[in-house]
Amino acid sequence: MTKTTDSVTECRWVAVAKLGEPIPRHGLPVEIEGHCIALFDLSGRLCATSNICTHQLAYMTDGYVDGEYIECPMHQGRFHIPTGAPQCPPVTEPLPVYPVRMEGEAILVGLPGASDP
């Protein structure tokens, strides 16, 4: 995976996929440096969230996507994908979200913190 640093936001940008590769409707699970991330294509708008539900251990990419919302497969709590905001019980904590950008043919996800030396 390719890493670059964005000095404005202090993100480490990590390549996770290539443009044109299919992203499943329920999201693409990606493991980056110990972070379980779900990459979503919402009608051309790329979004990334944690792939782990904040309510209990469940992979969000095993859930159901309806528009901009993902439903957890374990207890049917819903989250707004672009913001991570919880939408209904039993979830109360938002999903962490990650910035996404394109660089050439690569799709990159921003991880917090400075780049490795």
Image: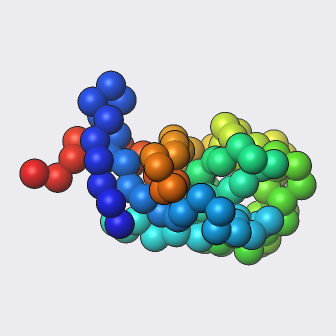
The one nearer the camera, 68 or 107, is 107
Q: Is residue 18 in view?
A: yes
The quarter holding residue 73 reads: bottom right
**Whole-percent x, y for residue 98 in the image:** 51, 45
Snapshot colouring: rainbow
Q: Is residue 4 left or right of residue 71?
A: left
Query: Is residue 53 visible to the viewer in this orientation of the structure?
Result: no
Q: Report the number of numbered marks.
A: 0
Residue 41 location (% of width, % of height): 72, 54
In the displayed image of the protein, which residue is found farthest to the left? 117
Quarter of the picture holding the N terminus: bottom left
Q: Nearer the viewer, residue 93 or 49?
A: 49
Residue located farthest toward the right when viewing the structure as drawn: 66
Q: Residue at x 64, y 68 (%)?
A: 21
Question: Residue shown at 10%/51% (left/top)?
Answer: 117
Q: Please name the residue shown 69% across and 56% down the image.
A: 40
Tell me where residue 45 appears, x and y as whole percent. 71, 43
Q: Is residue 33 above or below residue 108?
A: below
For this orientation, the residue located farthest to the front is: 104
Q: Which one is nearer the viewer's eye here, 99 or 79?
A: 99
Tell me if residue 114 comes above or below residue 48 in the rendering: above
Q: Is residue 35 left or right of residue 77?
A: left
Closer-to-camera residue (116/80) = 116
> Where in the figure is residue 60, as x and y percent of width and height?
69, 65
Seen in the picture, residue 43 relative to 59 is either above or below; the reply is above
Q: Residue at x 36, y 29 (%)?
A: 9
